[in-house]
Amino acid sequence: RLVESGGGLVEPGGSLRLSCAASGLTFSAFNMKWFRQAPGKEREFVAQISNTGRNSDYAGSVKGRFTIVRDSSRAMVYLQMNNLQPEDTAVYYCSAGMSWNHLANDYWGQGTQVTVSS
């Protein structure tokens, strides 16, 4: 089970940190990922971090602004989002996958809403 939290309303240029709590799975075996889905759009990849935490990967639209980290001792993954812009408005989902492939995910969270607006 994956449970996201930390979403909310923020002004352009602001920051948020999303959290994802994992339970019922062997956390250290899974690559952890963040996706987002804006209204009327398809779900898109945002970032992922390897099961060891040594490797990460970002969508071009968020590179340099977002950072994904994991705390394996707590089975948590975080997405630090800085310099948020209105186009970042979306429901953000956490996922876990044995594969590094963005499209291969074994578990999904329910999502948390992020709204960037003045």
Image (tube, rainbow, N blue to C red):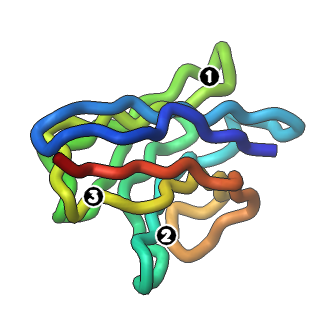
Identify the residue shown where x is 40% and y is 71%. Answer: 38
Camera-near label (3 vs 1) is 3
Residue 6 horizontal/vertical position (percent): 50, 32
Type of amino acid at the residue the image marks with label 3: Asp
Q: Is residue 110 left or right of residue 117?
A: right
Whether tag 3 and tag 1 are in contact, CB under 8 A, the answer is no
Q: Earlier in the sequence, mark 1 or mark 2?
A: 1
* Residue 71 location, quadrant: top right
Q: Nearer the viewer, residue 66 or 112?
A: 112
- Residue ID for mark 3: 88
Q: Tell me the element at label 1.
A: loop
Can residue 24 be seen at all in this image of the molecule?
yes
- Disc sitting over residue 102 in the figure: 2
Camera-near label (3 vs 2) is 3
> For the residue carrying disc 1, how many other residues have a C-alpha within 10 Å: few (<14), some (14-19), or many (20+)?
some
Residue 59 horizontal/vertical position (percent): 27, 63
> For the residue carrying disc 2, how many other residues have a C-alpha within 10 Å: few (<14), some (14-19), or many (20+)?
some
Identify the residue shown where x is 18% and y is 63%. Answer: 61
Q: Is residue 98 above or below residue 75?
A: below
